[in-house]
């Protein structure tokens, strides 16, 4: 069994992630294979649309292969990680600007790198099994793969809330926040894929989609906005501490547990992307951070504590958020030494 199954099937170019045992984590090689297929299919008149899904019920894709990146970083090979992110972001931009319908079936867990190969597409499907999250701050990264673009466009200041806390949302809230478009019950996915294979027409997706009820975030939005619209992370933390709401207590714990550098830079990044919108700009902002994350940030320690040793006792570079100097935040927001990442589109 390979890590990915790429084939033409009827009228569709069909990509299936097949690393079910590792929650379909996206490797560097898988990203390059997807990119090649998309370039080939963009010029293939037999391919009317592209569909990406995954094996198993548990996860569509739980993120990039951070264990591999960790091993490279521990060995001092920082350039390899930078090369992975550069290639991955090029794929993310290609998906966002793709010249044919790109349908992503987000059944199961969708996190990190899984967001970049799904939620940037033109037609994004969720099921009752979908669990969507951006927990990068917990491992010393920031929400990336273009997710700062999605977060900046979410209603009100839900983007800041979800990014800083890594909070998980279900299918209703994924649609409400603009991360997905259509709800299709998981038992109907087979019929949908068969229909699309036969017709190559996205109208079949519309006919098989169902309406959803409002999720919890829409009901909590005014409370969240009142706090996460505040200018600084210090003000946000102060108001969370004053709140007696359960959600605020959980948010406070998540933020304080995450990498202080990541928290500070994440807030600045989302607001920079909101002020200067667009997927390419978002990816450039994110690349400024990740290109330094191994050598100058908390990424290696974060992955060690949460994924490798699983002791959840990360020793961050700075103990608390208030300890992070302004010049460190400025470094992660500044141009990389060889310039911003560029895209063909």
Image (spheres, rainbow, N blue to C red):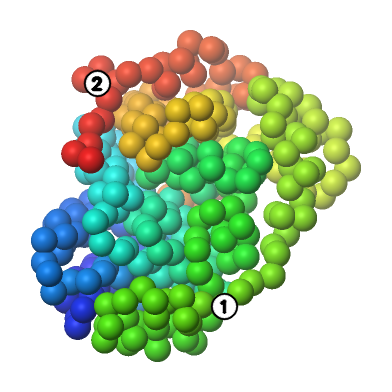
Compared across the picture, whether 118 is left or right of 85 comes to right
Compared with residue 11, is residue 112 higher up or lower down, i.e. above or below? Answer: above
Q: Which of marks 2 and 1 is nearer the N terminus?
A: 1
Q: In which quarter of the image is the N terminus?
A: bottom left
Determine the residue positioned at 26% across, 68% down. 50
Q: In which quarter of the image is the C terminus?
A: top left
Residue 340 on image: x %, y %: 27, 25
Label 2's element?
A: loop
Determine the residue positioned at 42% across, 22% down. 332
Q: Name the residue under label 1.
A: 210
Determine the residue positioned at 32% across, 81% down. 196
Inspect this view and state whether residue 97 appears. Answer: yes
Compared with residue 330, is residue 68 higher up or lower down, i.e. above or below? Answer: below
Determine the residue positioned at 66% across, 41% down. 156
Residue 94 on image: x %, y %: 25, 49
Inspect this view and state whether residue 266 appears. Answer: no
Residue 81 on image: x %, y %: 27, 38
Crowd around label 1: few <14 · some 14–19 · many ≥20 (10 Å): few
Q: Name the residue under label 2.
A: 339
């Amino acid at each position: 069994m390979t890590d990915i199954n790429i084939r033409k099937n009827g009228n569709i170019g069909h990509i299936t992630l097949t690393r079910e045992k590792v929650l379909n984590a996206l490797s560097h090689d898988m990203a390059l294979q997807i990119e090649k297929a998309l370039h080939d299919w963009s010029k293939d008149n037999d391919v009317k649309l592209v569909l990406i899904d995954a094996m198993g019920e548990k996860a569509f894709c739980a993120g990039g292969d951070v264990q591999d990146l960790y091993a490279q970083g521990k060995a001092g090979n920082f350039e390899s990680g930078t090369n992975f992110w550069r290639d991955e972001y090029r794929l993310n931009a290609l998906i966002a600007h793709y010249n044919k319908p790109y349908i992503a079936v987000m059944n199961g867990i969708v996190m990190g790198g899984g967001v970049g190969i799904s939620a940037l597409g033109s037609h994004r499907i969720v099921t009752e099994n979908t669990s969507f999250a951006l927990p990068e701050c917990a491992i010393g990264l920031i929400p990336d793969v273009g997710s700062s673009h999605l977060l900046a466009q979410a209603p009100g200041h839900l983007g800041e809330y979800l990014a800083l806390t890594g909070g998980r949302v279900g299918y209703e809230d994924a649609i409400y926040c603009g991360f997905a478009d259509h709800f299709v019950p998981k038992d109907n996915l087979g019929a949908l894929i068969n229909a699309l294979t036969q017709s190559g027409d996205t109208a079949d997706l519309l006919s098989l989609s169902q309406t959803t009820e409002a999720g919890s975030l829409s009901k909590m939005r005014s409370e969240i906005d009142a706090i996460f619209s505040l200018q600084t992370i210090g003000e946000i933390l102060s108001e969370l501490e004053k709140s007696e709401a359960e959600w605020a207590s959980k948010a406070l714990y998540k933020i304080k547990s995450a990498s202080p550098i990541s928290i500070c830079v994440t807030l600045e990044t989302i607001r920079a992307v909101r002020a200067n919108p667009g997927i390419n700009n978002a990816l450039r902002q994110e690349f400024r951070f990740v290109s330094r994350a191994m050598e100058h940030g908390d990424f290696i320690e974060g992955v060690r504590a949460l994924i490798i040793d699983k002791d959840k006792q990360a020793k961050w570079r700075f103990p608390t958020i208030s300890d992070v100097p302004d010049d460190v935040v400025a470094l992660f927001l500044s141009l990389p030494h060889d310039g911003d990442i560029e895209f063909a589109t």
